[in-house]
Image (cartoon, rainbow, N blue to C red):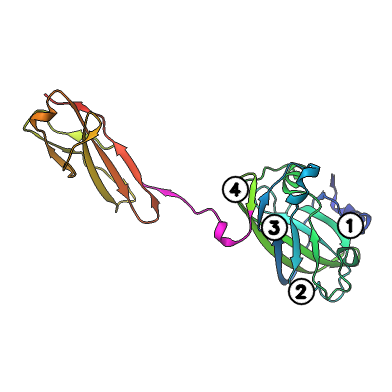
Amino acid sequence: MTIPARGCAALLSAVAVAAGVAVITTAPANAASLGKLAITPTKGTAGNGTIADEGSLISVKTSAGCAAGADSFFVTITGGGFTTLGHPTYVVGKRLLADAGSLSPSDPILTPLSQVLSETAKDAGVTLAKGVYTLTLSCVSGVGSTNVGDFTGTFTMTDGTHFAIGSAVVPPVVHVVGFKAKPTTTGVFKVGKTVSISRVTWRPTTVSVSFRWRRDGVAIRGATKSKYVLVKADKGHRVSVTLTVTKTGYKALRFTTAAKKVA
């Protein structure tokens, strides 16, 4: 449900002793960082919101107690379609510290989210996408009127269904070698003539290129230069060349020119 900003305090009060999910039109004020959130399990699925998905529920644990004056907390999610401002989603509705097994504000909090990620996204009207998401546990006091500090932790959606914990699982940015115009072969395709690769402008400009000339698609032994002298064995056949372009940090490119018949 969506409620106006003036109803926020009423909402927080209404869910003070039970977990729930709600979307509000104002974000809580920025608060001091109190520490990190440990997130478990280390990997899993977003789930489908069924009983069988209980194992997909994420739990969070604070690295310390909430802070003096706190009597309750809530957890929010940002990343992807979940926004920091405008419509933050309450993943765990406001709960008393005692309901999370915390004997006092100084004890670390351990609590599961109220829903699996797929249901949370559905309620928020967003689609889970590949990328990094942040969970924030906010410690509050006075029926949510004051935010006394936050704990944060991150997880990565490795696709739209699976998640994992840790910076090592952040999907790397894949750069692909490209070209301004397609490579072609130039020269007269006749026995005894030399044919070569057209001048190519690569993106990025500095790359390593290897060549493999082919006769009817089959690699020609020893023909690994940018130029090739056509021999008697090529007559009547179609000759092409495959370029393999590489650069550190980039995905290699393989490109084969159009085959041309040798006279």
Q: Amino acid at mark 4?
A: Lys
* Mark 4 vs 1, N-terminal side: 1
Q: Residues within 10 Å of mark 2 (few under 14, many from 20)?
A: some
Residue under label 1, please give it: 12
Dividing the picture into quadrants, the one containing residue 33 is: bottom right
Q: CA distance from mark 4 to mark 1?
A: 31 Å
| In contact (CB < 8 Å): disc 2 and disc 4 | no
Q: CA distance from mark 2 to mark 4?
A: 30 Å
Q: Amino acid at mark 3?
A: Pro
Q: CA distance from mark 1 to mark 3?
A: 28 Å
* Mark 4 vs 3, N-terminal side: 3
Q: Nearer the viewer, mark 1 or mark 3?
A: 3
Q: Nearer the viewer, mark 4 or mark 1?
A: 4
Residue under label 2, please give it: 64
Q: Which residues are magenta?
A: 164-179
Asked whether 213 falls inside the magenta stretch, the response is no
* Mark 2 vs 1, N-terminal side: 1
